[in-house]
Image (spheres, rainbow, N blue to C red):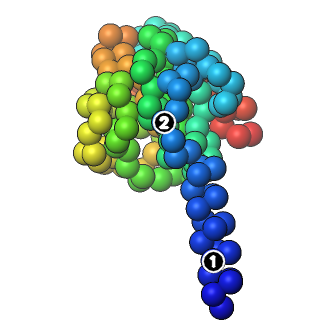
Amino acid sequence: MRPALALALSLLLALAVACGGGAGDGKGADGSDGTLPTVTITLIDGAGKRAELSVELARSAAERSRGLMFREELAEEGGMLFVYQRETRAGFWMKNTKVPLSIAFIASDGTILETQDMEPLSKKLHRPARAYRYALEVNQGWFERHGLGPADRVEIPAEARGE
């Protein structure tokens, strides 16, 4: 029984290390190092005004868990799109995230449900009032500067949705 327990603990430790512990190097949406795929998404306000963002895709549990942690900066027109297979109510926090961010929670059809500002290094949990399928993190104030908010739309390419 003891060898099996030791093996199981060794495997768990190896998995934890492989899933994103560590300090990171700050690369990503501000000059991607190629570790995550990047796509361009388009956000559209109620009047039809369009804004584009180049976003990294966080699709696996490990990628979503790491998010933008340890980054020193984020390009003004960059961000990270968190993609879930189905609607979720998962929350977000800013542990180990140094860049002030805003987050949009987005429904399956691309409608922005809610936006929130998040403070660096905070453990405050952020979640919307309703379930969502995508979450988009950008530099804090980006949505406001572009006049975007609830009921506006996000066009997400099929390859980002996993289709």
Which element type, helix, strand or loop, lies under badge 2?
A: loop
Which quarter of the image is occupied by the N terminus?
bottom right
Quadrant of residue 101 in the image? top left
Vertical relation: 110 (above or below) 48: below
Q: Which label number is shown at residue 69?
A: none
Q: Nearer the viewer, residue 1 or 144?
A: 1
Q: Is residue 150 visible?
A: no
Check the image and report above or below for 53 versus 116: above
Identify the mark nearer the N-term, 1 or 2. Answer: 1
Q: For residue 73, what is the image quadrant? A: top left
Image spot of residue 83 (x, y percent): 57, 41
Q: Residue at x 64, y 58 (%)?
A: 14
Give the structural element (helix, strand or loop) at label 1. Answer: helix
Q: CA distance from mark 1 to mark 2?
A: 27 Å
Residue at image coords 65%, 22%: 33
- Which residue is tagged 1? 6
Q: Which residue is mark 2?
A: 23
Task: State whether residue 23 appears in this view.
Answer: yes
Left or right side of 126 for 78? right
Q: Residues within 10 Å of mark 2 (few under 14, many from 20)?
A: few
In-front residue for pair 7/52? 7
Q: Amino acid at mark 1?
A: Ala
